[in-house]
Image (spheres, helix red, strand yellow):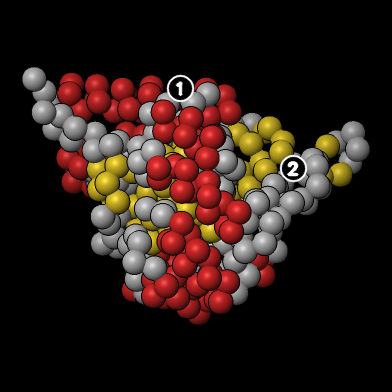
Amino acid sequence: MSQLSLAVELAGLGLRNPTMNAAGVLGMSSYQLKRLYESGAGAVVTKSLGRQPRNGHPNPTIVFVEGGVINSMGLPNPSAEYFRDEIKRLKAENIPVVASFFAASIEDFTYLASILTDAGADALEINCSCPNVGREKCMLEADRESLEKVTKAVREASSLPVFVKLTPNVANIVEGAKIAEENGADGITAVNTLKALAVDIDLRKPILSNIIGGLSGPALKPVALRCVWELFENIEIPIIGCGGVSYWRDAVEFLLCGASAIQIGTALMDHGVELFKEVNEGIRRYLEENGFRGVKDIVGLAHET
């Protein structure tokens, strides 16, 4: 019998396989998240949660473009306080939960970290990189001092693994990752969406109500892979790859570039939740056919050639 295992560990967070949903995708309720887990995800990630309920931007908020989707949802969410019971429901069924959250101040980041920790989350993901809300909401990572303070405050407020989600919309993603690492982050999620815009030539105006949105999907993958590659060569903490994973081969590419796990978002819109099973079966076949015994055997392997 094969001893091959897809199990991975991220700074103490044990997963049965290296797949998760990306924050914001089917993460608004315990029912949705449970469905993702039952479909094969190794862990589930909540919608990015704030201190107060938030409606987000008015429609239109999504537009399909070449190679992906641009969204400007604006972080709609029911609040972390409301979501406490949703997390408890998931934990009652032993489902690993990563709680994503954002805030407008250090005090709110600390408060939310405590609330989500007490609710029973298994790990925290700091969303400091959403490209379609105002800077005051969470666009911190271009600001070294804010990123440093937020990471440190969350680290002090919780004993859980802390992952910091970074943006590709910077000149040097490694700089932000190092700041997060130095201030207690246990891992980096790379990357959030890429700032983008779509225009309606008949109306002669931007399509999205917020004008600017975030590009996700296949077009983002080469950028995300580059970011994961650079991070792997410059930081010691694990990396969660995110951006354009649509098939199992995409997941393997991220692992080879240095990701220890991957998140799937936009592709779930096209392929459905069954994609988790397909990706994991593909990873397993790749490992078996190439003589590897586990996911960790190929993490960063492309750097050795």
Q: Is residue 279 left or right of residue 150?
A: left
Residue 80 on image: x %, y %: 57, 57
Under circle 1, the secondary element is: loop
Q: Quarter holding the N terminus?
A: top left
Left of 92 or right of it: where is 291? left
User: Where residue 249 appears, x then y in whole percent?
Assistant: 36, 28
- The answer to the question of whether label 1 and label 2 lie on touching residues, with beta carbons closer than 8 A, is no
The residue carrying pointer 2 sits among few (fewer than 14), some (14 to 19) or many (20 or more) residues within 10 Å by Cα, namely: some
- Residue 41 appears in view: yes
Q: Residue furthest left?
A: 1
Quadrant showing the C terminus = top left
Q: What numbered label is drawn on residue 274?
A: 1
Q: Residues within 10 Å of mark 1 (few under 14, many from 20)?
A: some
Residue under label 2, please give it.
Answer: 61
> Residue 257: in sight, yes or no?
no
| Number of callouts | 2
Q: Which mark is residue 123?
A: none
Query: Viewer-proximal residue, 57 or 245?
Result: 57
Residue 164 image position (x, y, % from top left): 44, 60
Label 1 vs 2, first from the N-terminus: 2
Q: Is residue 181 left or right of residue 68?
A: left
Amino acid residing under circle 2: Thr
Image quadrant in which you'd find residue 289? top left
Q: Is residue 192 above or below residue 277?
A: below
Say if 17 sits above or below 139 in the image: above
